[in-house]
Every structure is written in structure tokens, then in C-alpha cells.
Image (cartoon, rainbow, N blue to C red):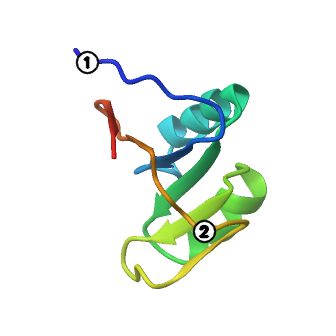
Amino acid sequence: MRLTLIYPIETALDLTAARQVGSSVRRIVNGIGCHVAGIVAGSKEYNCVIKELGFDACISCRDPKASCGKHSIGIDVCFDNVRCYRA
């Protein structure tokens, strides 16, 4: 198992933003002081991820040009259901 350190001011990308793991990742990473971006399956999940779950940015996997959020996305660390790794 390999651990990756994440530092304040970095941006983390969560590959499962609208799922239970995604909301847990958001809470942990926001607690450290980082920005969190998430990937969702469709545009219907945008409002849930941004407004309800509190992600800073959101990207649709079906339409990569469609994104929304507070800032431009530069990814430092990537989370999926199995591991966390440096982008």
C-alpha cells in the first residue's frame, strides 16, 4: 500500500464525487485546507456535487468540456475507490 501526502492549497480530484466515498473524501480534504474537484456522470449531478456536497469544481466524464466551479482546475492529487496518487 502506498500513501500520498496532501498539503494545504493543493487540489484533489475525486473520481467518484457523487457517491458516498466522494463525500467522505471531500470532508477529509477540505479539513486539510485543500480544494476539491469531482468527476460526475452527467449534468444532473452538478448541483448535488457543487451545492449540496460542497465541492469546489466539477467535471462531467461524458462531456469533458463542460465544467463548473470556483476556480480553474489544476490537479495535484487524485483519489479513486482504491488508492490515492499524485497526478
Q: Residue 74 appears at what percent x and percent y?
A: 50, 59
How far is disc 2 from disc 1 in space, using C-alphas?
A: 28 Å
Classify mark 1: residues with Cα within 10 Å, few (<14), some (14-19) or many (20+). Answer: few
Residue 45 occupies quadrant: bottom right
Q: Residue at x 57, y 29 (%)?
A: 7
- Asked if marks 2 and 1 touch (Cβ < 8 Å), the reply is no
Q: Nearer the viewer, mark 2 or mark 1?
A: 2
Report the quarter where the N terminus lies: top left
Q: Residue at x 50, y 69 (%)?
A: 59
Indicate the amino acid at tag 1.
Arg
Q: Residue 52 appears at what percent x and percent y?
A: 76, 54
Give the camera-side residue of 58 and 9: 9
Give the camera-side residue of 84 and 74: 74
Q: Residue at x 61, y 32 (%)?
A: 29
Say which mark, if any, is on residue 2: 1
Single out the residue that lies furthest toward the right: 51
Judged left or right of residue 70, residue 1 is: left
Tally of numbered discs: 2
Q: Which structural element holds mark 2?
A: loop
Classify mark 2: residues with Cα within 10 Å, few (<14), some (14-19) or many (20+). Answer: few
In the image, residue 28 sits, relative to residue 73, either above or below, namely above
Q: Which structural element holds mark 1?
A: loop
Indicate the amino acid at tag 2.
Ser
Say which mark, if any, is on residue 72: 2
